Image (spheres, rainbow, N blue to C red):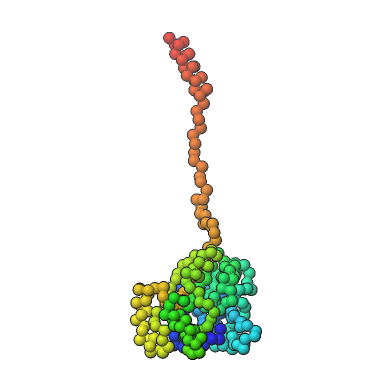
């Protein structure tokens, strides 16, 4: 967690943070409900544009044996207050009690990202939404990260991205969401600039953001996903769900008809 927060203070981190904040603001501004939860990255306020009355921030604690175990509370002092500290794999909320859950890089920080998604699915109401951001392993930034790892094995080199666990690709994340019953509403990729460290160099390649979205959309350094929880088999029923029985004419009595005809014939014969 501490390494990830430090990286977001670097020029590449600030570029990624600005793009992700724009995605959260645009996607969550019109998501309505009562209870929203952000998990991880306390220095981010990804729910700032959302208008739900109850918006909570949950911090992910570091392992007890780690020297950064108390780093979360200190670093989150500059952000909005932390409501609770919890593991993302075991959320202390009732079933179907939240309308929105935001996971800014929380799956990469989780020891079991699939368990985290299962917990999010459990606590979300029907038609509830989850917003996710992460690093794309199919990007120029991830390629430089992999190359730096090989250099570190040889005794040198500096990583470009933070060590936040395993990066989760978009297709892999999409499969997990579909298996749980989510429906993908929006996907976006961003940060197509080369893996350079300086702010001026990143600004010089700013034109690649527009070209990348049009030419190679799935190779951005970061991605954003918005998914909605669907109830299998659910169907809205209106006032016309019952069929109105039609008016069926009563069948004519054949016996009465023959009797009537026979009486008419008798009267005609008597008249003659």
Q: Horizontal and vertical percent for residue 25?
A: 46, 77
Instruction: Out of 145 and 49, give the one closest to the viewer.
Output: 145
Residue at the spot 51% in from the left edge and 42% down from the top edge = 245
Please identify the quadrant where the C terminus is shown.
Answer: top left
Total labels: the figure holds 0
Instruction: Out of 261 and 180, give the one closest to the viewer.
Output: 180
Relative to residue 158, is residue 55 depicted above or below? Answer: above
Instruction: Out of 139 and 268, give the one closest to the viewer.
Output: 139
Residue at the spot 51% in from the left edge and 32% down from the top edge = 250
Q: Horizontal and vertical percent for residue 236?
A: 52, 57
Residue at the spot 45% in from the left edge and 69% down from the top edge = 186
Relative horizontal placement of residue 197, taking residue 125 as reference (left or right): left
Q: Quadrant of residue 197?
A: bottom left
- The residue lying furthest to the front in this view is 154
Q: Horizontal and vertical percent for residue 178?
A: 51, 65
> Residue 131, can we see it?
yes
Q: Horizontal and vertical percent for residue 138?
A: 44, 75
Please identify the quadrant where the N terminus is shown.
Answer: bottom right
Relative horizontal placement of residue 126, taking residue 29 as reference (left or right): right
> Residue 34, can we see it?
no
Relative to residue 87, is residue 204 depicted above or below? Answer: below
Residue at the spot 61% in from the left edge and 77% down from the top edge = 87
């Amino acid at each position: 967690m501490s390494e990830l927060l430090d990286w977001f203070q670097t020029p590449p981190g600030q570029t990624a943070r600005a793009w992700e904040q724009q995605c959260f603001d645009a996607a969550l501004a019109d998501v309505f409900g009562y209870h929203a939860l952000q998990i991880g990255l306390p220095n981010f306020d990804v729910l700032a544009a959302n208008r739900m009355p109850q918006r909570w921030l949950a911090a992910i604690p570091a392992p007890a044996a780690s020297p950064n175990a108390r780093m979360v509370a200190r670093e989150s002092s500059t952000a909005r207050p932390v409501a609770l500290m919890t593991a993302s794999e075991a959320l202390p909320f009732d079933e179907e009690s939240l309308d929105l859950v935001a996971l800014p890089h929380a799956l990469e920080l989780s020891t079991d990202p699939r368990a985290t998604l299962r917990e999010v699915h459990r606590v979300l109401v029907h038609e509830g939404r989850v917003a996710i951001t992460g690093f794309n392993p199919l990007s120029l930034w991830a390629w430089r990260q992999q190359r730096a790892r090989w250099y570190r094995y040889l005794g040198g080199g500096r990583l470009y991205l933070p060590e936040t666990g395993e990066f989760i690709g978009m297709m892999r994340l999409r499969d997990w969401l579909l298996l749980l019953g989510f429906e993908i509403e929006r996907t976006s990729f961003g940060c197509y600039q080369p893996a350079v460290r300086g702010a001026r160099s990143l600004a010089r390649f700013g034109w690649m953001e527009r070209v990348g979205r049009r030419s190679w959309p799935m190779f951005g350094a970061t991605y954003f996903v918005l998914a909605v929880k669907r109830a299998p088999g659910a169907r809205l029923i209106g006032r016309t769900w019952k069929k109105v029985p039609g008016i069926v004419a009563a069948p004519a009595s054949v016996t009465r008809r023959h009797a009537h005809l026979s009486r008419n014939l008798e009267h005609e014969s008597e008249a003659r």
